Image: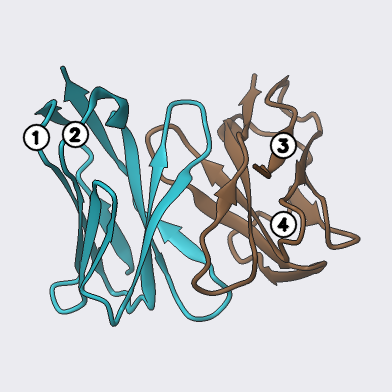
Amino acid sequence: EAEVAQSPRYKITEKSQAVAFWCDPISGHATLYWYRQILGQGPELLVQFQDESVVDDSQLPKDRFSAERLKGVDSTLKIQPAELGDSAMYLCASSLWTAGYEQYFGPGTRLTVT
Amino acid sequence: SQKIEQNSEALNIQEGKTATLTCNYTNYSPAYLQWYRQDPGRGPVFLLLIRENEKEKRKERLKVTFDTTLKQSLFHITASQPADSATYLCALGGNAGNMLTFGGGTRLMVKP
């Protein structure tokens, strides 16, 4: 069964350093999402791509976060510089298309900023 | 402001009983609602989707209801098993963009 791949699974970094997360969605899925999940809370959408275009990034802290999906397939989320409050699980998800479709989540990247 | 509320306290039930989880929302007009299961340290897994014009949806031991007047969805697991122990998330979506807004989740513990 096809799955969403994410790497790394765990990342420990010092504050002010740069970090990057990678996501490979299920083949053929046009829509890709990045979420942040703080322990004990639900996932919060950071950015949504339709193919290579950003559909929604209203919750992305653009002063330090950036995301790209250059060829409309895999995607990278970057944080520079990392802050202590960025410690969380970063989840990538994909769906076949847009409204009304189930989302398939990857295993996530657990980020710890020290 | 928009708000999605799920019981933040864990729900503890005995094996074989029916578990009922609640999702209430305010200041939303969702076109559909989804339920996901999340195990510790893993990504959510899709369970069911119900649209605004549907009252009820079933899948095996799972049942979801959606009352747009009460602004509430109920999620039922019948004949619960210890393997059903997990956190269950509800998420609301609109017609544009498939952007989902998640509730905080309810942790279910099924005891043998």
For marks 3 and 1, give the one nearer the viewer: 1
The answer to whether residue B104 of the structure is visible from this angle is: no
Which callout, 2 or 1, points at the residue further toward the start of the chain?
1
Q: Is residue B108 above or below residue A97?
A: above
Helix, strand or loop at disc 3? strand
Which callout, 3 or 4, points at the residue further toward the start of the chain?
3
Residue B80 tag number: 2
Q: Colour of chain B?
A: cyan
The amino acid at mark 3 is Gln
Q: Are marks 1 and 4 in contact (CB under 8 Å)?
A: no
Residue B17 tag number: 1
- Chain bearing mark 3: A
Residue A90, position as x, y percentages in the image: 61, 39
- The chain coloured brown carries which letter? A
Q: Which residue is mark 4?
A: A62
Along the horizontal axis of the image, is B89 left or right of B56?
right
Q: Are marks 4 and 2 in contact (CB under 8 Å)?
A: no
